[in-house]
Image (cartoon, rainbow, N blue to C red):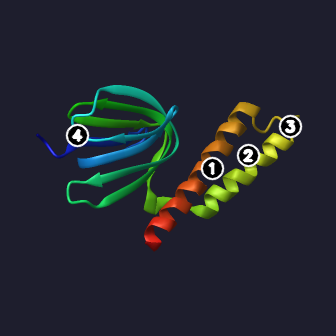
Amino acid sequence: MSKTIQCDIVSAQDAIWSGQAAQVFATGVSGELGIYPRHTPLITQLKPGPVRVVDAEGNEQFFFVGGGLLEVQPHMVTVLADTAMRGDDLDAAAAERAREEAERALENRGDDTMDVGEAQKKLAEAMAQLQALEQLRKKLKH
């Protein structure tokens, strides 16, 4: 039995990561998912948040996705993200600015700067980025 599964993480702009994984963890709309080789096939929407990949050598790779789809086949996991970036590329200051901008847009609903749905989406993504950064910092401390 294979001890790894092919994993591809792609965004609309770029291929972010591709390789053999022993485990893949992501947050679907119904909760946390842990994918292992020979997992039952599934397709689910992803919430904005972290995706963790444990590679064949046991090293953990950390990514952030801004939502999208996760498809699991017995020998392949594909993350089709709206936006995606490596954990090392997350910028706390930029995420904080995006959070503040979205909150201001929600407070000033009469302005035409951003509609409510878009502001809520940006706020959710910014908050998810900040939470992902916090998780990454905690992991690096251990």
Q: Is residue 30 above or below residue 127?
A: above
Q: Is residue 59 above or below residue 82?
A: below
**Which amino acid does the dot numbered 2 rest on?**
Ala
**Which amino acid does the dot numbered 3 rest on?**
Asp
For the C terminus, give its image quadrant. Answer: bottom left
- Residue 102 got which mark? 2
**Which amino acid does the dot numbered 1 rest on?**
Ala
**Which amino acid does the dot numbered 4 rest on?**
Pro
Q: Residues within 10 Å of mark 2 (few under 14, many from 20)?
A: many
Q: Which residue is mark 4?
A: 37
- The answer to whether residue 86 is left or right of residue 110 is left
Of pointers 1 and 3, the one earlier in the residue sequence: 3
Of pointers 4 and 3, the one earlier in the residue sequence: 4
Please report the residue visible at 45 percent of the width from the left and 65 percent of the height from the top.
139
Q: Which residue is mark 3?
A: 111
Q: Nearer the viewer, mark 4 or mark 2?
A: 4
When asked about the image quadrant of residue 134, the answer is bottom right
Contact (CB < 8 A) between labels 4 and 1?
no
User: Whole-percent x and y of residue 126?
Assistant: 63, 50
Of pointers 1 and 2, the one earlier in the residue sequence: 2
Q: Secondary structure at mark 2?
A: helix
Q: CA distance from mark 4 to mark 1?
A: 32 Å
Please report the residue visible at 29 percent of the width from the left and 36 percent of the height from the top.
77
Q: Secondary structure at mark 1?
A: helix
Q: CA distance from mark 1 to mark 3?
A: 21 Å
